[in-house]
Image (cartoon, helix red, strand yellow):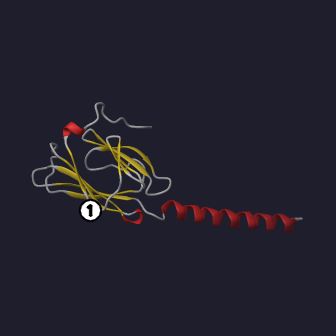
């Protein structure tokens, strides 16, 4: 009887470790969103979004009419943990269970949502296109500011 229980225990441990390892691999195989927060000499902020494993490369968003204190900055942020601090704006929602996941920012009153299938800017879906630049002005902001989701 002891042999039967030990065999069942070993099989259960092996199955658990195998499934856990497989799930951990599936959760992180694409890697996190890579976002570069930058500003030019005048202090105009911009972000550059990359996630090569889902086909997103060099998508730039410029926030015209906005200013940041630090000029000529470039800070890379890998969005691999929940509520990771960013140099400007804030993360208002993230679901990183399976990376790259869903990340939503409030950047100067603009709601920017990163999804593997599309980019959402102020509630408007935009297909991902490599090497593109979007310029957002203050008049493009939502009538009500984006709210943090809990």
When the figure is inspected, residue 103 is found, relative to residue 31, above or below; the finding is above
Q: Is residue 116 shown left or right of residue 112? A: right
Residue extending farthest to the right is: 1
**Residue at the spot x=43%, y=57% of the render?**
100
**Residue at the spot x=33%, y=36% of the render?**
146
The residue to which callout 1 is attached is 131
Residue 49 location, x and y as percent? 31, 57
**Residue at the spot x=45%, y=53% of the render?**
101
Q: Quadrant of residue 73?
A: bottom left
Which of the pair 134/107 is nearer the observer? 134
**Residue at the spot x=41%, y=65% of the render?**
53
Quadrant containing the N terminus is: bottom right
* Label 1, residues with CA under 10 Å away: few <14, some 14-19, many ≥20: few
Which of the pair 62/80 is nearer the observer? 62
Which structural element holds mark 1?
loop
Residue 68 location, x and y as percent? 17, 46
Quadrant containing the C terminus is: top left
When the figure is inspected, residue 129 is found, relative to residue 91, above or below; the finding is below
Residue extending farthest to the top is: 144
Residue 94 location, x and y as percent? 42, 47
Q: Is residue 115 shown left or right of residue 20? A: left
Residue extending farthest to the left is: 42
Residue 17 location, x and y as percent? 64, 65
């Amino acid at each position: 009887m002891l042999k039967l229980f030990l065999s069942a225990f070993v099989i259960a441990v092996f199955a658990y470790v195998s499934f856990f390892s497989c799930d951990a691999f599936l959760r992180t195989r694409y890697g996190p969103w890579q976002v570069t927060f930058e500003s030019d000499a005048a202090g105009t902020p911009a972000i550059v979004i990359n996630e090569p494993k889902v086909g997103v490369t060099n998508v730039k968003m410029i926030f015209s009419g906005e200013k940041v204190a630090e000029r000529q900055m470039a800070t890379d942020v890998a969005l691999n943990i929940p509520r990771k601090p960013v140099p400007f704006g804030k993360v208002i929602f993230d679901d990183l269970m399976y990376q790259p996941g869903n990340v939503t920012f409030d950047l100067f009153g603009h709601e920017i949502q990163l999804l593997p299938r599309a980019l959402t800017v102020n509630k408007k879906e935009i297909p991902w296109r490599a090497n593109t630049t979007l310029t957002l002005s203050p008049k493009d902001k939502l009538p009500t500011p984006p709210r943090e989701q809990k």
